Image (cartoon, grey):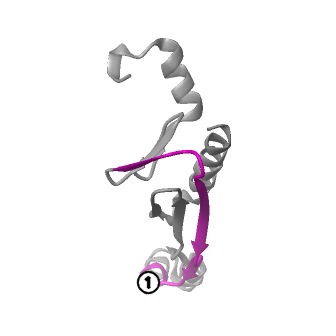
Amino acid sequence: MIGNTQSKAARAHDSDHGGYFAGVTLTADRIIFGGQWQPLTGVSAAVSEFGGVDRRTTATRVVAGAVVAGKTGAIIGALARKKIDNREVTITISGPLYTWSVPVRGSEGRRAHAFVAKISTAAALA
């Protein structure tokens, strides 16, 4: 059932076993991505992570530190390194009809793992 015609109990069940993350919709009996859907029976999901967070010194921080506090400020500015997030995270969902590769922002890795766990649980219950 769709919209307001769905009972409160059914909506509560869907929220317990459903969810939405990175363009993927999970319901109690199916998973939907990119306009395609498939039943949860036989679905598996995994997270792949590549890269990491690098830090580098920037000239702007060194100069700003020097302007504010002289040589000591320049040293502090050099130590205040900029973070560069080079992580790539992908959720791979394989099922009886489709295999999807879903890109996720590197900073969303923890949420990706939690969502994959939710998919796995829902698939086991299907």
User: Which amino acid type is shown beneath numbered disc 1?
Assistant: Val
> With 121 as the anchor, is 33 left or right in this view?
left
Residue at image location 53% in from the left, 63% down from the top: 92
**Which is nearer the eye, 35 or 75?**
35
**Which is nearer the eye, 66 or 125?**
125
Magenta includes 124? no
Residue at image location 52% in from the left, 36% down from the top: 29
The quarter of the image holding the C terminus is top right
Residue at image location 46% in from the left, 57% down from the top: 97
| Residue 116 in view, yes or no | yes
Tell me if residue 112 comes above or below residue 59 in the rendering: above
The magenta segment is 36-62
Please tell me whether mark 1 sits on a helix, a strand or a loop.
helix
Magenta includes 38? yes
Tell me if residue 66 comes above or below residue 89 in the rendering: below
Residue at image location 61% in from the left, 56% down from the top: 44
Q: Where is residue 43 shown, x and y percent of the image? A: 58, 53
Residue bearing mark 1: 63
The quarter of the image holding the N terminus is top left
Q: Where is residue 75 shown, x and y percent of the image? A: 59, 84
| Residue 24 in view, yes or no | no
Tell me if residue 3 comes above or below residue 66 in the rendering: above
**Which is nearer the eye, 96 or 103?**
96
**Which is nearer the eye, 16 or 96?**
96
Q: Crowding near pointer 1: few (<14 within 10 Å), some, many (20+)?
A: some
Quarter of the figure with residue 103: bottom left
Q: Where is residue 31 shown, x and y percent of the image? A: 47, 45
> With 114 as the anchor, is 61 left or right in this view?
left
Which residue ends up furthest to the front in the rendered image?
96
Q: Where is residue 10 shown, x and y percent of the image? A: 50, 19
